Amino acid sequence: MSTYDKEEFMHYPSDMRPPKASSAPKPAADTSDGLTYIETVFAPYTGAKTYIYKTVEKVTSGDYLAVQTPNGSLQIVKVKTPDVPKPNYKCKWAFQKIELGLLADLEDSELQADGVKRL
């Protein structure tokens, strides 16, 4: 059993954060700890609820990363905003960027092996 509070590892959706003033400039992301904080969405990637994770991966909007959910399973999230200010709560890790280009390369090599050309 972990000594950490269960609350400490909860992800807080964007609708629980204070609203941003539309005229206020976006604060610079805090990188003093060497981490990047990213806003993500889970499948079906509609963005209805967003979650903040920390990562050391170099990501852009639309990239996919693996995360561990509170029940211990692994899930894939899509990066919505790649550089957000560090929140005032503890974040879980987003790790292992999913390289979809590799999948396309594998599919192409398989098609070429079968003598089929991609249109």
Image (tube, grey):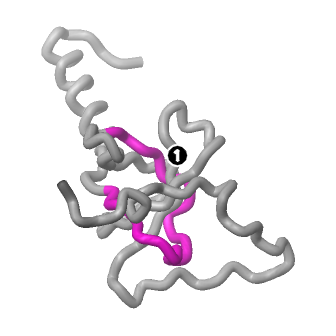
**Between 106 and 87, which is closer to the camera in this rendering?**
87
Quadrant location of the C terminus in the rendered image: top left
Where residue 82 sits: x, y (%)? 50, 63
Residue at x 47% of width, y 72% of height: 89
From what the image shows, is residue 74 above or below residue 12? above
Task: Write the start and end of the magenta stretch as one range.
Answer: 75-94
Q: Secondary structure at mark 1?
A: strand
In the picture, measured across the screen, residue 113 lies left or right of residue 71, that is: left
Give coordinates of residue 86: x percent, y percent: 50, 77
What amino acid is found at the position of numbered circle 1 in the picture?
Val
Q: Is residue 36 above or below residue 69?
A: below
| Residue nearest the observer in this picture, 106 or 54 | 54
Residue 42 in percent (x, y) is at 48, 40
Residue sitting at the far left? 113
* Magenta-drawn stretch contains 77: yes
Q: Point out the residue furthest to the right here.
A: 23
**As drawn, 74 above or below 30:** above
In this rendering, would 98 be left or right of 32?
Answer: left
Q: Quadrant of residue 105?
A: top left
The residue that disc 1 covers is 41
Camera-nearest residue between 102 and 88: 88
x and y percent of residue 78 in the render? 46, 46
